[in-house]
Image: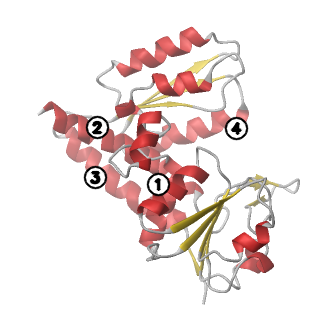
C-alpha cells in the first residue's frame, strides 16, 4: 500500500512548535527577525514574499520586507544587505531570486553574513554541509530531510537518485542524503538513458520543473518518490515532475503536488530564522 507524504501535515506541526519556541524567546526579550529583499515587480516573487511574511508574522517572527525597483544599482542592494548584517534585531536575511541582470547574484549571496544566511546559499554554509558540519541548509532540501524522517523512511544504505543538479535543491539534497549514508547518483539534462538510472533508485528525488517527466515505467516497485516540481498547466492545474496518478501505484511512499514538499520550504525558512535567533542568544551569554 502506498503512503502519500503530505508536507502540510508536518509543516503545521512544526509551525506550532516554532510558535512555542518564539514565545519562549520573547520571555527573554528576544524576537527572531527576518529581513526579505525583493528587486523588481515579478508577480510570482511578490506573491511568494507575501506568503513568507504572513507565515513569519503568524508565529511571532518580526518580518521586514524591502522592495526595490527593477533598475536598482548593485551597490544599493549590497549596502542594504550590510545594513541588515549589522542590525541586531535581524537574525535572517533573504534576497528573493532571481535578480535582474545588472546585479551579480553570487556577490549578493556572499555579502550576507553566513550566520544570517537562512536560505543556506552562502559558500561557507555550502561548505559546512559538504563537510557534515553545523550550518544553515537550503530550505527545500532541509524540508525533504524532515519529511523523510517524519514518515519513517530509512535513508542509510539506500540508492538515492537525484534528477536535477541546481544549487537550490539537487546538489544540497544529494549531499544531505550522502551525509546520512545513502549512495547518491545525480542525473541531469546531459544524462544518457535517464530511465536506466531512475529504475535503480530506492529513493528518487525529482527537481527539474518539467511536468510529468517521470512515468511509472521509470521507477522500480516500492521506490520512495519525492516530487519537487511545480508547473502550472494552461488549465490552471498545478502538477509536479512526476506523473502522480500512475506512479503512486508502484511507489511505497510518494509526495503529492500540491501539498507535498512545497509547504515545507517556507516552514524551513521559519525554522532557520528561529535557529539563528537561538544561536545568537547562546553566543551572547
Quadrant in which residue 43 is drawn: top right
Quote the CA–CA distance across marks 3 and 4.
31 Å
**For discs 1 and 2, the disc positioned in front in the rendered view:** 1
Q: Quadrant of the C terminus?
A: top left
Quote the CA–CA distance across marks 1 and 2.
18 Å
| Pointers 3 and 2 in contact (C-beta within 8 Å) | no
Q: Nearer the viewer, residue 9 or 143?
A: 143
Q: Quadrant of the N terminus?
A: bottom right
Q: Nearer the viewer, residue 14 or 27?
A: 14
Quadrant in which residue 269 is drawn: top left
For label 3, the SS is helix
For label 2, the SS is helix
Quote the CA–CA distance across marks 4 and 2.
29 Å
Quote the CA–CA distance across marks 4 and 1.
23 Å
Q: Mark 1 highlights which residue?
A: 142
| Pointers 4 and 2 in contact (C-beta within 8 Å) | no
Q: Residues within 10 Å of mark 3 (few under 14, many from 20)?
A: some
Quote the CA–CA distance across marks 3 and 1.
21 Å
Q: Does residue 179 appear left or right of residue 277 in this picture?
A: right
What residue is rendered at 35% in x and 27% in y? Answer: 90
For label 4, the SS is helix
The numbered dot on residue 277 is: 2
Amino acid at each position: 500500500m502506498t503512503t502519500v507524504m503530505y508536507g502540510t501535515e508536518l509543516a503545521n506541526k512544526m509551525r506550532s512548535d516554532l510558535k512555542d519556541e518564539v514565545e519562549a524567546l520573547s520571555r527573554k526579550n528576544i524576537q527572531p527577525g527576518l529581513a526579505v529583499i525583493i528587486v523588481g515587480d515579478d508577480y510570482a516573487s511578490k506573491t511568494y514574499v507575501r506568503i513568507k511574511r504572513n507565515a513569519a508574522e503568524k508565529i511571532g517572527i518580526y518580518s521586514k520586507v524591502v522592495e526595490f525597483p527593477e533598475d536598482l544599482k548593485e551597490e544599493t542592494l549590497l549596502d542594504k544587505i550590510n545594513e541588515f548584517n549589522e542590525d541586531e534585531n535581524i537574525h535572517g536575511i533573504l534576497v528573493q531570486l532571481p535578480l535582474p541582470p545588472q546585479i551579480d547574484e553570487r556577490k549578493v549571496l556572499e555579502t550576507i553574513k553566513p550566520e544570517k544566511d537562512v536560505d543556506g546559499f552562502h559558500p561557507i554554509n555550502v561548505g559546512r554541509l559538504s563537510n557534515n558540519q553545523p550550518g544553515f541548509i537550503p530550505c527545500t532540501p532541509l524540508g525533504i530531510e524532515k519529511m523523510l524522517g517524519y514518515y519513517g523512511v530509512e535513508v542509510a544504505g539506500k540508492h538515492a537518485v537525484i534528477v536535477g543538479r541546481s544549487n537550490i535543491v539537487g546538489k544540497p539534497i544529494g549531499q544531505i542524503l550522502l551525509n546520512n549514508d545513502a549512495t547518491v547518483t545525480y542525473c541531469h539534462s546531459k544524462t544518457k538513458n535517464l530511465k536506466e538510472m531512475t529504475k535503480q533508485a530506492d529513493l528518487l528525488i525529482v527537481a527539474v520543473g518539467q511536468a510529468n517527466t517521470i512515468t511509472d515505467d521509470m521507477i522500480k516497485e516500492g521506490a520512495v518518490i519525492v516530487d519537487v516540481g511545480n508547473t502550472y498547466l494552461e488549465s490552471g492545474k498545478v502538477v509536479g515532475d512526476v506523473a502522480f496518478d500512475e506512479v503512486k501505484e508502484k511507489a511505497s511512499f510518494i509526495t503529492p503536488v500540491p501539498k507535498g514538499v512545497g509547504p515545507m520550504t517556507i516552514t524551513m525558512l521559519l525554522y532557520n530564522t528561529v535557529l539563528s535567533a537561538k544561536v545568537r542568544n547562546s553566543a551572547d551569554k
